[in-house]
Amino acid sequence: MNPRRILVTGGAGYIGSHTVRLLLRQGHDVVVVDNLSKGYRHNVPEGRLRELSLADTPALTALMRQHGTEAVIHFAAFIAVGESMREPARYFANNVSGSLSLLTAMVEAGVHHIVFSSTAAVYGNPQGSPILETFPIQAVNPYGESKVMVETLLRWFDEIHHVTSVCLRYFNASGADPEGQLGEEHEPETHLIPLLLRAVETGKPVTVFGDDYDTPDGTCIRDYIHVNDLAQAHILAVEHLVGGGASDKFNVGTGTGHTVLEMIGAVEAVTGKKVPYVIGPRREGDPPSLVAASHKLRTKLGWAPQYADLRTIVEHAWNFAVSRRAASIPE
Ligand code: UFG
């Protein structure tokens, strides 16, 4: 793709920072908007960060004009399903109103393309597996619903303002930058792989949420997708849109599912240590199996995962955990 001027919201967070790194490596001119409520300054290369709230429509408009933004990649959002069940208003305000402000600024500044971080959570408890993009949209928590609402906003902004969009519905983002400089640092951490690695390091057992599901070993199945493969999907989506492609929605997953116990096996193989764990009750709202049908992304955008192997994903996450401990990166 020719070099493009791309504005990335949430570029100081986990998936955003990996995408910014790939964009810069591929020669694009990137500006990051992040209020650092969840992201980290150390994730953004020098000179690229603008500390702004998405609610500040005039500031976003001015930034897009000054930068000459051609496309936006929109990551900034709250992501914790459990928290969204306790504080729905915060999720709708941040995720939906924030996106509306961003879209308003785009229209003001004449920016016509956006790639949006959506989620497999828009499918709720899906009717079957693998999950196709045409499956019913039926979120079962405010987090997922907030993403559905933004997908709806995007449809109307295309219809009325000719802003084209790609919604990428992520499955389980995981792994880390292969060079070990970026990785997953959520606070508090709720995701399986970092928790398993932490258990290996601290010796404190992790709880496996249920082993009585109707799956081969009784634990939940997820489609773990390497964060760099996810990042590459965003770049292909920008290319599609700036090349005149129509608005669309894609699952981003490998198409292969793994159980929690398989993941524990992969962590033990990579670290050479036993993972201390206990079996606990099911976590409320966990679907037994979420696996993407990924052929639409492969055929329409030419995407192919480079790091689909579970062991590679865990290796990269482990390298990051080790390097971060060694460097003890400041906030
Ligand atoms: N799990 C455990 N113990 C833990 C943490 C997780 O057994 O301590 C299990 C979960 O039950 C699940 C699997 O590990 O089966 C993965 O759990 P994560 O919390 O890592 O991820 P989720 O599948 O729950 O959620 C992810 C994203 C959400 C998104 C969802 C969409 O984090 O943002 O996928 O399906 F909404």
Image: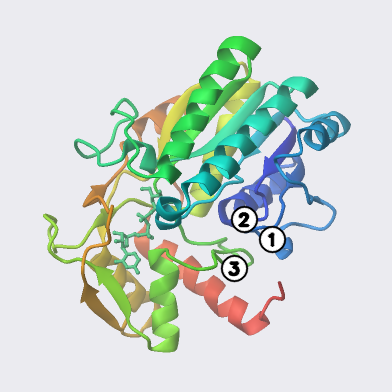
Q: Point out which mark residue 13 bears.
A: 2
The residues bearing labels 1 and 2 have C-alpha atoms spaced at a distance of 7 Å
Residue 94 image position (x, y, % from top left): 59, 44
Q: Residue at x 48, y 68 (%)?
A: 189
Q: Residue 298 lies in what quarter of the image?
A: top left
Q: Residue at x 56, y 36 (%)?
A: 96
Note whether residue 1 is visible.
no
**What amino acid type should be assigned to the residue bearing mark 2?**
Gly
Nearer mark to the viewer, of 3 and 2: 2
Q: Quadrant of the C terminus?
A: bottom right
- Say few, some or many: other residues with alpha carbon within 10 Å of mark 2 (under 14 / 14 to 19 / 20 or more): many
* Residue 328 appears left or right of 232: right
* Label 3–label 2 contact, CB within 8 A: no
Q: Residue 123 lies in what quarter of the image?
A: top left
Q: Residue at x 29, y 74 (%)?
A: 207
From the image, tell me which residue sits under label 3.
180
From the image, tell me which residue sits under label 1.
43
* Residue 151 appears left or right of 133: right
